[in-house]
Amino acid sequence: MCIRDTYQWTNAEGEAFFVKYHFKTNQGVRSLDAGQAAELAARDATSHQTDLLQAIERGMNPSWTLYVQVMPAAEAAGYRFDPFDVTKVWPHADHPLHRVGRLVLDRNPDNVFAEVEQAAFSPNNFVPGIGPSPDKMLQGRLFAYADAQRHRLGVNHTQLPVNAPKAPVVDNYGRDGLHATRYGARHDKNYEPNSYDGPVQTGEPPAAPLAVHGWTGTHEAPAHPKDDDFFQAGELYRLMTAGEKDRLIANIAGGLSQVTRDDVIEKNLAHFHAADPEYGTRVEEAVRALRED
C-alpha cells in the first residue's frame, strides 16, 4: 500500500526532502476472482474483518513493513513528471525504497465504539521534522479531515482516550466546550500570550520553509518533461502475470459491457489502447463478446 500524499521531511541541517510512505504486507498477496468474491460475500459479508479479528486472537499478528521514498526538494521542479500528481508513482529506479520500521496489529479493540468509531486521524498532526508539501491533495486534507472530526466528534475530540497524546503532561489551551474531559484549575487561562506562566509556542517550524511560485486559480497544470497520463498505466499492465492480466480484463469488461451508450464505451476503450495496444485490444474484444451474449 502506498500513501499517495507526499510529505516533507527536514533533517538536522535544515535540508528539505519530499517523502512517500509505503506499507508492504508481510502476509503475502493473494486475490479472489469475481466469482470467488461473490460467493464469499454471500456467506460472510464481513469476511475480511472476520479474518483479521480471528488472526489476532490466534496470535498470528499481521504486520506491514514501512518503507519510504526520498526526493531532495530541489529535484521536484525539474522532475520528468509532476511528483505531486497523485495519479503517478515515483519509479523505484529513481528513488529506491528505504526500510524504516514495521506496523504490527497485536490486539483487537475491547470496545469498538470507543476505540474505533471515535478514532480521529488527521494529516495535520505533525511532529518536528515532518511537515506538508505542495501536494494539492494533502493541502485539501489538512483542512478537511480536522473539520470533519470536529463536526463528527466535537471540538474536544482530542481529549478522548483514543485520540489523546500519550505524553504524561499535555500543556495547551484546550479548556472548555462541549464534551470537555480535561480538568484544570479554576483560573486557568485559555489565551496566549498571558502573564500567568501559561505554555508558549516554541517558535520553531515543524519543517523547513518552502518557496512557492507559479499561478493560482483555474489554469493549465505546469508542464513537466514527461507528463503522460497513460504511460504508468501501461507499465503496470506489462508487469502483470498472464493470470493477473486475465482477471483484470474480465473485471473491466464485466462492468464496461453493461454501459448502454456505445460512444461512452468507445471513449473508455481509448484509454486502455493509449496505455498499451494489447491491453486495449483485449478489453475491447472482451466487451464485444459480453455484449453479443
Image (tube, grey):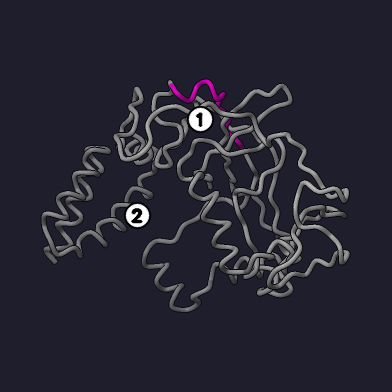
Q: Residue at x 38, y 49 (%)?
A: 244
Residue 71 lies in the magenta stretch: yes
The quarter holding residue 188 reads: bottom right
Residue neighbourhood size for the residue with mark 2, other residues' Cα within 10 Å, grouped as few (<14), some (14–19), many (≥20): some
Q: Is 182 positioned to the left or the right of 28 in the image? A: right
Query: x and y percent of residue 79 in the render?
Result: 43, 23
Residue 214 lies in the magenta stretch: no
Q: Which mark is residue 92?
A: 1
- Circles 2 and 1: CB atoms closer than 8 Å: no
Question: Which quadrant holds the C terminus?
Answer: bottom left
Tell me which amino acid carries mark 1. His
Residue neighbourhood size for the residue with mark 1, other residues' Cα within 10 Å, grouped as few (<14), some (14–19), many (≥20): few
Tell me which amino acid carries mark 2. Arg
Observer-nearest of 171 and 93? 171
The quarter holding residue 161 reads: bottom right
In the structure shown, which secondary structural element does the residue marked by tag 1 occupy? loop
Q: How many marks?
A: 2
Query: x and y percent of residue 148 in the render?
Result: 54, 62
Q: Nearer the viewer, mark 2 or mark 1?
A: 1
Instruction: Please state the extent of the stretch shown in magenta in the rendering.
Output: 68-77
Q: Residue at x 61, y 26 (%)?
A: 16
In the structure shown, which secondary structural element does the residue marked by tag 2 occupy? helix
Q: Is residue 190 above or below residue 267?
A: below
Q: Is 205 positioned to the left or the right of 262 in the image? A: right
Observer-nearest of 291 and 98? 98
Query: x and y percent of residue 207 in the render?
Result: 65, 33
The quarter holding residue 105 reads: bottom right
Q: Is residue 104 above or below residue 94?
A: below
Observer-nearest of 20 and 123? 123
Say whether disc 2 or disc 1 marks the residue closer to the N-terminus. Answer: 1
**Which residue is label 2 attached to?**
247
Query: x and y percent of residue 183 in the render?
Result: 84, 67
